[in-house]
Image (spheres, rainbow, N blue to C red):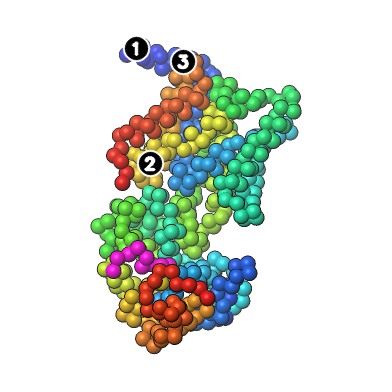
């Protein structure tokens, strides 16, 4: 028993581990709560695409000394609008235009990144995350963003639920459904940026989708789904970080594997949906 | 309740166009408050478009729609819409009661201390449509008719004066259709104006006070017994007239 406690407390002697733990839990919880909408509105591909597409925004913001959040949010909004425009303009399906934009912008981001020297970030950290390297400032920014995102989700909760369930009825009653769709995409872009530190952009999608989907299998009600999803996201982050500490595996991969393991267990537990 | 205004809905020379295609034209009709109206026409006749126009969701190329004397789009709280089942995201896990509570969404933020009032009203609405026992079931697990009644309860909770139900009979068995009409009749008696779009011609004269037959324009408008002449049926559904075919063709 004492040994278990020592295993848990030992990493916490290092302040970088404490910072990593705080950031990971915030990311795990926020991703899963927002992820409940991603799962229920069928935005998984959009989320993954945004994660890749915000790369040039983040890189350019860092280059000109802006907040990466501003860069990501700007690109996030631009991408969301561009997808709608291109889909209408070309008659192609939405997943096609998402695919084109996400690959194109990701390529642009990589190009700018490799062409600019002296930038404090490297590609590998953005792709795979580097949670052990977060600074105290990163912790506060992450906390601020998590509070902002969860606050906005709380404030617009009823409206978001209404538009997600019945978009036409919501519009008739006077809810600004278009504004809320864009708002969700902006929140998604913000969450993606804080998640980049913890899991990297390749694995962001797993943190958005997997804990929320697991929660859906367990509770099948929306509010409880957000709460249980948040808890599962937080647990995945903590357990993943410890596994990464003891077994020397990348933290993002460890967190996603834990989340995926929980999902598989929940699937096995649950009776088959008819 | 203020139901003294005689005409709940006045449509004058309404024309709606999507690109080059005229979807509705020359639509002129006035509906008195407290009427149960069947909006009848084949699929693709413009029934949903008419509802969207009344709700102020799409622009009119020509003409005017007044809802209780106000332009469409300025009366949003007073209109309630029950979409066709294809427009609902059934995956979203809400209970019947949570759906009815959505009807209070535009009112509850303003008033303090309104939560318990809201809940009482929501429970009353669930009772009125006979869905109280099933209030904690997921709407996705309910039958077509039960779902429709939940949406009617939501319209009641919204305290709307005008209800629009799009293809409310599709996927609903006959007995449930009758139950739905029964519930709607009660609302009509309280002065609500109800528009129900359907391509189903079954028992129209027993079910509705007025029928509005559309196929891009108004083919007939009035009490079902007089409105439905063989000529109208032929215009609506082609030579096979009375057959209840799903896909009538558009001329």
- Furthest toward the bottom, the residue is B226
Callout 1: SS: helix
List the residue tagged with mark 3.
A247
- Front residue of A125/A197: it is A125
Q: Chain of mark 1?
A: A
Query: Which comes sooner in the sequence, label 1 or label 2?
Result: 1
Callout 3: SS: helix
- Front residue of A39/B183: it is A39
x, y percent for residue A30: 49, 37
Q: Which residues are magenta?
A: B165-174
Magenta residues, dominant SS class: loop
Q: Residue at x 42, y 41 (%)?
A: A226
- Front residue of A146/B201: it is B201
Cβ–Cβ under 8 Å for marks 1 and 2: no
Q: Residue at x 56, y 46 (%)?
A: A95
x, y percent for residue A47: 54, 40
Residue A216: assigned label: 2
Task: Report, in whole angstroms, how far the alpha carbon at label 1 lies from the one at label 3.
Answer: 20 Å
């Amino acid at each position: 028993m004492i040994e278990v406690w020592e295993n848990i407390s030992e990493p916490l002697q290092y302040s970088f581990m404490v910072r990593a733990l705080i950031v990971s839990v915030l990311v795990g919880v926020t991703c899963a709560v927002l992820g409940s909408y991603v799962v229920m509105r069928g935005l998984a591909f959009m989320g993954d695409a945004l994660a890749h597409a915000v790369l040039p925004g983040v890189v350019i913001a860092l280059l000109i000394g802006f907040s990466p959040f501003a860069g990501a949010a700007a690109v996030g909004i631009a991408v969301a609008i561009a997808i709608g425009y291109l889909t209408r303009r070309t008659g192609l399906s939405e997943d096609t235009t998402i695919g084109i934009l996400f690959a194109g912008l990701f390529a642009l981001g990589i190009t700018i990144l490799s062409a600019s020297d002296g930038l404090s970030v490297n590609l590998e950290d953005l792709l795979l995350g580097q949670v052990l390297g977060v600074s105290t400032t990163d912790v506060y920014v992450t906390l601020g963003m998590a509070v902002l995102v969860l606050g906005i989700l709380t404030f617009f909760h009823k409206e978001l639920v209404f538009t997600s369930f019945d978009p036409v009825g919501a519009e008739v009653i006077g809810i600004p459904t278009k504004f809320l769709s864009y708002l969700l995409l902006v929140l998604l872009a913000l969450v993606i940026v804080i998640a980049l530190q913890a899991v990297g952009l390749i694995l962001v999608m797993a943190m958005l989708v997997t804990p929320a989907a697991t929660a859906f299998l367990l509770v099948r009600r929306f509010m409880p789904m957000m709460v249980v999803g948040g808890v599962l996201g937080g647990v995945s982050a903590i357990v993943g970080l410890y596994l990464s500490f003891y077994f020397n595996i990348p933290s993002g991969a460890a967190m996603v594997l834990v989340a995926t393991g929980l999902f598989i267990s929940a699937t096995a537990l649950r009776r088959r949906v008819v | 309740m203020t139901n003294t205004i005689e005409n709940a809905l006045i449509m004058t020379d309404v024309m709606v166009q999507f690109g080059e295609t005229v979807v509705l034209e020359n639509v002129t009709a006035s509906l008195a408050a407290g009427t149960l109206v069947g909006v009848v026409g084949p699929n693709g006749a413009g029934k949903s478009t008419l509802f969207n126009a009344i709700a102020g969701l799409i622009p009119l190329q020509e003409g005017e729609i007044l809802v209780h004397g106000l332009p469409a789009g300025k009366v949003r709280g007073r209109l309630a819409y029950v979409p066709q089942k294809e427009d609902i995201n059934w995956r979203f896990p809400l209970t019947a009661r949570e759906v009815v509570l959505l009807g209070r969404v535009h009112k509850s933020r303003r008033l303090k201390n309104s939560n318990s009032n809201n809940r009482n009203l929501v429970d009353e609405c669930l009772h009125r449509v006979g869905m109280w026992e099933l209030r904690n079931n997921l709407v996705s697990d309910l039958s077509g008719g039960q779902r429709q009644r939940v949406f009617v309860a939501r319209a009641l909770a919204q305290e709307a004066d005008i209800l629009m139900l799009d293809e409310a009979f599709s996927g609903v068995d006959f007995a449930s259709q009758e139950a739905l009409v029964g519930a709607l009749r009660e609302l009509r008696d309280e002065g609500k104006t109800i528009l129900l779009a359907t391509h189903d011609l079954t028992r129209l004269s027993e079910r509705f006070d007025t029928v509005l037959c559309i196929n891009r324009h108004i083919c007939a408008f009035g009490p079902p017994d007089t409105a439905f002449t063989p000529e109208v049926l032929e215009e609506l559904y082609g030579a096979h007239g009375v057959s209840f075919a799903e896909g009538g063709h558009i001329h």
